[in-house]
Amino acid sequence: MQRQVATALEIDTPLYSKIERGERKAKRSQIHKIAEVLNIDSEELLILWLADQVYEIVKDENVAAQVLKVAEEGIKYSTKKD
C-alpha cells in the first residue's frame, strides 16, 4: 500500500514511510490525494493535518490554550461577518 500511495503522490516510498511515521510532514497539496488513495474522508484528514500544523506552532508556549481560544473567537467572528 505504501508504494501505491507514494506513486499517487509522486514521491518515493521511503519519503512516504517517513510521513507515515511522523518524521516528515505531508504537504497540504498531498492531503486530498492521500485521502483518495486510502479511501478516507478528505475533509477529516485535512482537519487533522491543520490541527497538527497549529499544534506545532503553539506546543511549547505557556499560553497555548489561551491562544487557541482567541483564534477560535476570531474564527467565529469572521464566520459571522460572511
Image (tube, grey):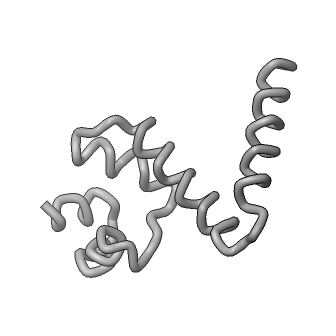
In the rendered view, tell whether residue 81 sits above or below residue 31: above
Q: Nearer the viewer, residue 59 or 37?
A: 59
Residue 6, image x, y percentages: 26, 65
Q: Nearer the viewer, residue 23 or 15?
A: 23
Residue 41, image x, y percentages: 34, 35
In the rendered view, tell whether residue 78 sits above or below residue 21: above
Residue 26, image x, y percentages: 44, 64
Q: Nearer the viewer, residue 41 or 48?
A: 48
Name the side, left or right, on which 32 lies relative to 29. left
Q: Residue at x 52, y 55 (%)?
A: 28
Q: Residue at x 34, y 60 (%)?
A: 9
Q: Residue at x 75, y 44 (%)?
A: 69
Query: Residue 56 appears in which quarter of the rendering?
Result: bottom right
Q: In which quadrant of the rendered image does the N terminus lie?
A: bottom left
Q: In which quadrant of the rendered image does the C terminus lie?
A: top right
**Numbered marks: total:** 0
Q: Nearer the viewer, residue 45 or 77?
A: 77
Residue 14, image x, y percentages: 26, 81
Name the side, left or right, on which 23 lies relative to 5. right
Q: Residue at x 56, y 51 (%)?
A: 50
